Amino acid sequence: MRSLIIYFIVFLSFSVNSQAADPVDPLEELNRKFYAFNFDVVDPLFLKPIAKTYDELSPQFVKTIVDNFFSNLDDLPSAANSLLQGKVSQSIEFASRFLINSSLGLAGIFDVATYLKIKGGEPEDFGQTLAVWGVESGPYLMLPLYGPSTLRDAPSNFFDSLLDPFTYNDNYEARVGLKAFDVVSMRAEMLGIDDLMSGDEYLFVRDIYLQTREYEIKDGELDDAFGDFEGFEDFEDFEDF
């Protein structure tokens, strides 16, 4: 989840003038309405102001703790999906990260596993697993409140949610509040990206999302269109963003 933000920034920077493959978007008219709701109403009126306040008032160590906490929760579904994709060693690393950070790292607020050089790899979700199994992405979807997705990826979120420990918390308000805090934290990390968007913003966001998902499914293999950018052959160069 968190690395998706990095990919989004990278593609925003280098995909402005690139020609993306024709995406399947038969529901474009409806998708544009949901896009307008998400990005012209919910984000500027609610999400962005809250994210800016969080970003301005929170010291860096608090942001790091928040990021570590939610990243730790992502390691468990990543472990399961890595195993389902046949990446056994990666699955073991993700599971080890979760166990170590949940215990020694005090519920994940400290990233002890990375200190021990147990990195796991890039996050895996059930949408990627379905893609590895040969399931086509299906139509592009712009979901209200949630954002960009596809017919394959949208239902897969349910599977990943079953591996989230907080799904089984009886306190509904706590679950909702925690999810909202995660969304605000991620939006805060993306402040300023709006200024990099150009042209038809709906098409821009759609193509960026589809390219990003293709990148994740292929485990970091970039298309030839990015071959002209010297020095970026290894996508890990961007991890310092």
Image: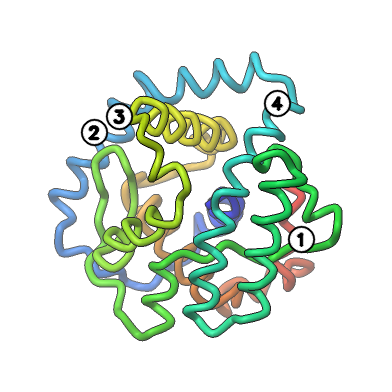
Q: Secondary structure at mark 3?
A: helix
Q: Position of residue 204 (x, y in %)?
A: 39, 52
Crowd class of label 1 (few under 14; some 14 to 19; many from 20; radius 10 Å):
few
In the rendered structure, the answer to whether residue 168 lies left or right of residue 229 reads left
Q: Amino acid at mark 4?
A: Val
Left or right, 29 with respect to 137, comes to left
> Which label number is shown at residue 37?
2
Q: Residue at x 67, y 19 (%)?
A: 58
In space, the residues marked 1 and 2 are separated at their CA atoms by 35 Å
- Give the residue drawn at x 33%, y 63%: 156
Q: Residues at badges 3 and 1 in contact (C-beta under 8 Å)? A: no
Looking at the picture, how far across and down is residue 152, in whole percent? 28, 68
Mark 3–mark 4 Cα distance, whole angstroms, equals: 29 Å
On residue 191, which mark appears? none
- Single out the mark in the foreground, 1 or 4: 4
Residue 198: image location, x then y, percent: 44, 44
Q: Amino acid at mark 2?
A: Phe
Marks 1/4 in contact by CB < 8 Å: the verdict is: no
Q: Name the disc covering residue 40, or none.
A: 3
Q: With respect to residue 186, does 115 lie above or below?
A: below
Q: Residues within 10 Å of mark 3 (few under 14, many from 20)?
A: few
Disc nearer the start of the sequence (1/4): 4
With respect to residue 197, does 22 lie above or below? Answer: below
For badge 3, the amino acid type reads Asp
At 62% from the left and 49% from the top, the residue drawn is 72
> How many numbered circles are shown?
4
Do residues under tags 3 and 2 come within 8 Å of each other at their CB atoms? yes
Which residue was labeled with disc 1?
237
Give the distance between the C-alpha atoms of the residues marked 3 and 1, in whole angstroms.
33 Å
Q: Quadrant of residue 209?
A: bottom left
At label 1, which amino acid type do we have?
Answer: Asp
